[in-house]
Amino acid sequence: MNNERLTKLAAWAHTQAVDVIFPFWTSDYIVDKENGGFFGRVTLEMERLNDEPRGLTLTGRMLYAFSTAYRFLKNPLYLEKAEYTYNELMHRFYDPEFGGAYTTVTETGEVLNDNKPNYCEAFLIMGCSAYYRASGCEEALRVARECAAHMENEAKWGPSRYYNNMTRDWKKAEGMGFGGKKPKDGEEAPKRPAFFFPEGSVMFPHHLCQAYVQLYRAAGDENILQALREMAEYVVSDLYDETYHCFKTIVGPDGERVGTRQSFGHDCEISYLAMKVADIVGDETLKANMKRVVTSVLERVLEADFDPWHSLYNGGDLVSGEREKSHIWWAQAEAVTAMLLGYQLTGEDRFLDACEKQVDFLDKYFVNREHGDWYNNIVVDEDGWKVVDGMHGFDKLNGGKCPFHNSQMCFEIMERTQKMLCPEAKPEVLT
């Protein structure tokens, strides 16, 4: 075990959280003191705007990040921000009549979209569960359990299968429902996302899985443990693609792959999440099967999905070999954790090497040294590097740009390095 390198990696993660990521997200600069909550949008140039809907996804992610930061780092500022964000979530987004939360609202609290997609509702469960773990707030735990019950009783149509989108009163709805404002009569519908979702197709509900990890660790509910078991079994039996040695990005109703576009960031994120869930479930056969599958995925990522500058490609096509040119902040963060997991599972230095090289890339190109946190999208080539448009645009804060993935990376690294450096010691906190 490379103790010196792991210690250095842990120190880097701590510095990223304390000195780079959270100073921006805990700043009063992003707080809307007139309307309450946070500005809907802060541009790369630090202009504060409310022209973008305020989203459940962003708010729930911020609640998770602040709450977990408090548990790991013990700074009372993080708990203060978690409480503020929780109050925002309950005041603007929570649906007291039907449970769950609205997807998007205006700066004054007018509901723009009351659908309840599993992608977004997951962050209500995740944020409230994390807040309970940090604060002991019983109301937050009640809300998380209530929403999870709706997901299991109304949104679920099979083991680890959930409808993409639900109406306010928990009936199946059309579309993916990622959020945004519903078009009015005469308005154009939102542009189709990068991945096309045919009728009946789904993404693996990895954010719901993350939320259930938080809820299970908060309350130990057996029904949530059973849902986690089903999710882990689905990863091994259906989500893993034996042909391409990756996780299917889009899955048809019978488990078939849809298309050949692949998100390498999701391969990384699902790898360590699925291994974590298998460990929580505790079934030795499931753990062994998961280790086999996850190791296969990570080996393929390591061999095929890093660019000449040792940075993870965001995505590409599995058949043509085409790769996206720009890099996206969240996938970069997930690559760090995934490569560290590869080292944990195999003990092979090539995974630790890749983890460190990805860290160096982030430090060199993604850290915004003028205003804090990270840039969204960059391109690096023979001519140098530049910030570019892409997923979540240029903004420092908007409905998609948040402190979730990169802060989670920091927590994962701190926890995982502690386990490797002191295997006999039980971690004080668990992500």
Image (cartoon, grey):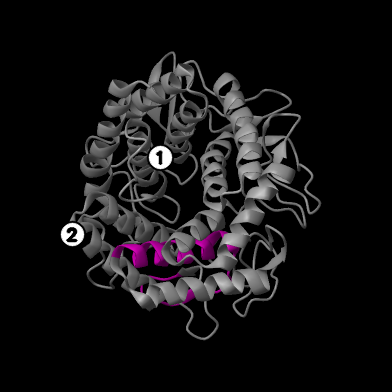
Q: Position of residue 251 (x, y in %)?
A: 73, 47
Front residue of 134/31: it is 134
Instruction: Give the residue type that dot 2 points to.
Output: Pro
At label 1, counting other C-alpha atoms closer than 10 Å, the crowd grade (few under 14, some 14-19, many 20 or more) is: many
Q: Quadrant of the N terminus?
A: top left
State the residue lying farthest toward the top: 382
Membership of 305 in magenta stretch: no
The disc placed on residue 376 is 1
Q: Position of residue 279 (x, y in %)?
A: 53, 46
Front residue of 81/368: it is 81
Q: Which residues are magenta?
A: 105-134
Any part of residue 208 in sight: yes
Q: Position of residue 400 (x, y in %)?
A: 45, 52
Front residue of 353/309: it is 353
Q: Is residue 424 left or right of residue 348?
A: left
Q: Secondary structure at mark 2?
A: helix
Identified at 56% across, 39% down, the residue is 271
The picture quadrant where one finds residue 387 is: top left
The picture quadrant where one finds residue 116 is: bottom right
Identified at 73% across, 44% down, the residue is 237
State the residue lying farthest toward the bottom: 97
Front residue of 75/287: it is 287
Membership of 121 in magenta stretch: yes
